């Protein structure tokens, strides 16, 4: 092959997807599973008991953490 | 039936539209050579962000989920809401674990999780166990999609007296589905998913805004549900969790999340994406569906407030609670909109059913046919065997629904979730470490299966008066603990599985039993699209093919 093979030939540093940011992903795994945090009726928001609106908010928590970790660990 | 004409017409038109799309899909992003399992079974491993979002979303959030979760809320209250934490927890898990499976599969051309296990642990036996577990767990899941469609058909009054008349619409629907899946492979559900998900989003958004307005606001909907649970004699229902079902709630959410990403159809959806970033970005975008599911679940309460009475079930004296949401739409919306909602559920059943049958077919082809029946099978032969297997799988699913009590499929699906979890040590842990010995993994699988079955057998259901397979909540007192608390069966089973795997591994190590050679390298787990090593190999193969 005549093309310059900079990518393949250069001695690449050992690849890894290890990053301290990955630990952040434990948050949306652990928090939604802690029922004592949200197993209440009051306070209601928009008619929703706490049990429901808090768990729906955890969806945003999940989105936020995966977005942050994706941005911080992007290979460039 | 006459007063449902508008619904039936809208439903049928939308159904015909997606059928045409299913056939056209073969030409969508058409490959040069469809007779390759990568093309038929994984859509050419080329799907970008949007397609993956629709495909995986359409795949994980099935029609059955959309019908059964609100039905569970209708009957049991807060316990049914486990679907929300379950579908939150799954994405960080995907992010951490499945991304490695994508990389190693990309580099080695693996099509199924069993392919990976075979290479990683150098054990065709373990791979066969993983493949069979996957197929057995998937079959009832496909049958359940039919339960979802049937709930809709029943509500539209499409029920006949004879066995055949009652099931004729399902048979026709599945025959069409089978035909276009055969022809177009994974491209068919990928294309149809666009329609399915758009319809579902429209229906749910309208429902969660319109219904509360009609029923006096969310506050009064929750109050109506609360009043119902207060009045019922069952101890476990309520607007929030009781003292005894919290462990069940947590372990069921976590266990279901772990099970979901081991299901062959989820893995098929993920492996079809074109690079790591597509998957990672989707982990932030897919939770949109979780929000949808959470709102949909609450429609179970809306049905309570609206005074919906579920239609009678297959046997005398039972009710089919899966008809709750279809009935709610039927009673509260004009016919044309109810028709759209029903089409959304009906089409929502087709997408996952197609992907599941493809996933099961891939497993059979790669890990049974090629491994044991015909080692030198060409790519074209593989693709053909997979296409035929996908037909067989669908015929089996239809037969399950026609000839067996639908309850049987629901039981099998319950079992399916528990058994698919037993592949976690080999597939999920295997992606990180090879420490566990292949013999240990086999022993752990056997132990996990045995205890899982035993526990499920011993779960009675007071509400339906059944002594066995009454649910997934196992009473801890049966282990001799003095407590009324319950726990998810699959969770205990997988812990036992792991424990046995570790012990047997230690024993086999001590006996110096060979552990086989690892077919993968550490670097494989980070490979990405345009991987230099892979590109070189590909160029080499093309040169060989030319000469």
Image (cartoon, coloured by chain):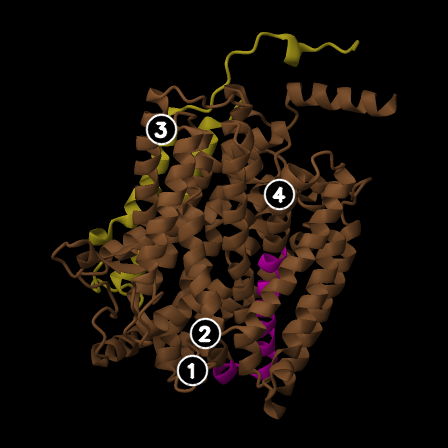
Chain colours: A yellow, B brown
Location of residue B69 in the rendering, given as x and y in whole percent from the top left corner: 41, 66
Q: Does B67 appear above or below B431?
A: below
Would residue B327 be seen by someone viewing this image from the given angle? Answer: yes
**Residues in magenta, as a range:** B330-354
Q: What chain letter is assigned to the residue under label 2?
A: B
Location of residue B252 in the rendering, given as x and y in whole percent from the top left corner: 33, 54
Callouts 2 and 4 on one subunit: yes
Callouts 1 and 3 on one subunit: yes
Location of residue B393 in the rendering, given as x and y in whole percent from the top left corner: 63, 58
| Most foreground residue, B361 or B84 | B361
Q: Quadrant of residue B221?
A: bottom left
Q: Does B1 appear above or below A15?
A: below
Q: What chain letter is assigned to the residue under label 1?
A: B
What is the crowding at mark 1: few (fewer than 14 residues within 10 Å), some, or many (at least 20)?
many
Q: Nearer the viewer, mark 2 or mark 4?
A: 4
Badge 2 vs badge 1, beta-carbon distance below 8 Å? yes
Side (left or right) of B535 relative to B150: right
Q: Nearer the viewer, mark 3 or mark 2?
A: 3
Side (left or right) of B135 relative to B545: left
Q: CA distance from mark 3 to mark 4?
A: 26 Å
In the picture of the structure, the residue carrying the numbered disc 4 is: B368
The label number, if any, that marks residue B322 in the structure image = 2
Q: Please, what secondary structure does the residue beneath circle 4 have?
A: helix
In the picture of the structure, the residue carrying the numbered disc 1 is: B310
In the picture of the structure, the residue carrying the numbered disc 3 is: B505
Q: What chain letter is assigned to the residue under label 3?
A: B
Sequence order check, earlier mark of 1 and 4: 1
Location of residue B388 in the rendering, given as x and y in whole percent from the top left corner: 72, 54
Q: CA distance from mark 2 to mark 1?
A: 8 Å
Q: Nearer the viewer, mark 1 or mark 3?
A: 3
What is the crowding at mark 4: few (fewer than 14 residues within 10 Å), some, or many (at least 20)?
some
């Amino acid at each position: 092959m005549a093309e310059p093979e900079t990518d393949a030939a250069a001695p690449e540093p050992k690849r890894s997807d290890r990053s301290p940011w990955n630990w952040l992903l434990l948050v949306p795994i652990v928090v939604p599973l802690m029922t004592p945090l949200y197993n209440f009726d009051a306070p209601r928001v928009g008619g929703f008991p706490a049990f429901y609106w808090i768990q729906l908010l955890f969806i945003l928590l999940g989105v936020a953490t995966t977005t942050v970790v994706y941005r911080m660990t992007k290979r460039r | 039936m006459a007063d449902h004409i508008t619904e039936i017409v809208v439903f049928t038109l939308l159904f015909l539209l997606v059928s045409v799309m299913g056939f056209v899909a073969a030409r969508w992003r058409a490959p040069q050579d469809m007779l390759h399992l990568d093309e038929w079974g994984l859509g050419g491993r080329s799907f970008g962000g949007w397609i993956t979002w629709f495909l995986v979303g359409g795949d994980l959030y099935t029609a059955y989920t959309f019908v059964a979760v609100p039905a569970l809320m209708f009957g049991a209250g807060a316990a049914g809401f486990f679907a929300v934490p379950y579908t939150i927890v799954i994405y960080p898990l995907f992010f951490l674990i499945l991304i490695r499976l994508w990389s190693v599969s990309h580099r080695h051309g693996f099509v199924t999780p069993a392919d990976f296990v075979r290479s990683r642990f150098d054990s065709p036996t373990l791979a066969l166990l993983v493949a069979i577990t996957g197929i057995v767990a998937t079959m009832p899941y496909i049958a359940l999609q039919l339960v979802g469609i049937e709930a809709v058909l029943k509500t539209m009054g499409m029920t006949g007296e004879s066995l055949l008349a009652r099931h004729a619409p399902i048979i026709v629907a599945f025959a069409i589905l089978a035909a276009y899946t055969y022809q177009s492979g994974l491209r068919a559900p990928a294309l149809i998913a666009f329609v399915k998900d758009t319809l579902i989003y429209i229906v749910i958004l309208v429902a969660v805004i319109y219904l509360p307005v009609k029923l006096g606001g969310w506050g009064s909907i929750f109050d109506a549900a609360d009043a119902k649970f207060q009045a019922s004699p069952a101890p476990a229902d309520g607007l929030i969790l009781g003292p005894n079902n919290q462990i069940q709630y947590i372990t069921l959410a976590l266990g279901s999340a772990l099970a979901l990403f081991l299901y062959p159809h989820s893995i098929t959806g993920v492996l079809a994406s074109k690079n790591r970033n597509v998957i990672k970005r989707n982990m932030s975008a897919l939770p949109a569906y979780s929000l949808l599911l959470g709102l949909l679940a609450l429609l179970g309460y809306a049905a309570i407030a609206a005074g919906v009475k579920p239609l009678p079930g297959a046997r005398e004296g039972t009710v089919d609670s899966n008809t709750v949401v279809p009935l709610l739409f039927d009673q509260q919306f004009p016919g044309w909109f109810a028709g759209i909602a029903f089409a959304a559920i009906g089409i929502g059943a087709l997408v996952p059913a197609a992907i599941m049958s493809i996933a099961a077919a891939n497993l059979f082809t790669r890990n049974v046919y090629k491994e044991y029946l015909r080692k030198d099978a060409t790519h074209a032969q593989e693709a053909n065997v997979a296409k035929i297997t996908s037909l067989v799988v669908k015929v089996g699913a239809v037969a399950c629904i026609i000839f067996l009590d639908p309850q049987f499929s629901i039981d099998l699906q319950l079992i399916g979730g528990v058994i698919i979890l037993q592949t976690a040590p080999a597939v999920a842990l295997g992606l990180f470490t090879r420490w566990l010995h292949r013999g240990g993994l086999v022993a752990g699988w056997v132990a996990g299966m045995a205890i899982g079955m035993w526990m499920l057998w011993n779960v009675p259901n007071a509400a339906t008066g059944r002594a066995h397979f009454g649910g997934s909540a196992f009473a801890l007192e049966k282990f001799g603990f003095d407590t009324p608390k319950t726990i998810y069966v699959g969770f205990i089973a997988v812990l036992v599985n792991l424990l046995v795997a570790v012990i047997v591994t230690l024993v086999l190590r001590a006996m110096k039993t060979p552990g086989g050679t690892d077919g993968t390298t550490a670097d494989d787990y980070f490979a990405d699209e345009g991987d230099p090593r892979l590109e070189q190999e590909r160029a080499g193969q093309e040169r060989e093919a030319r000469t």
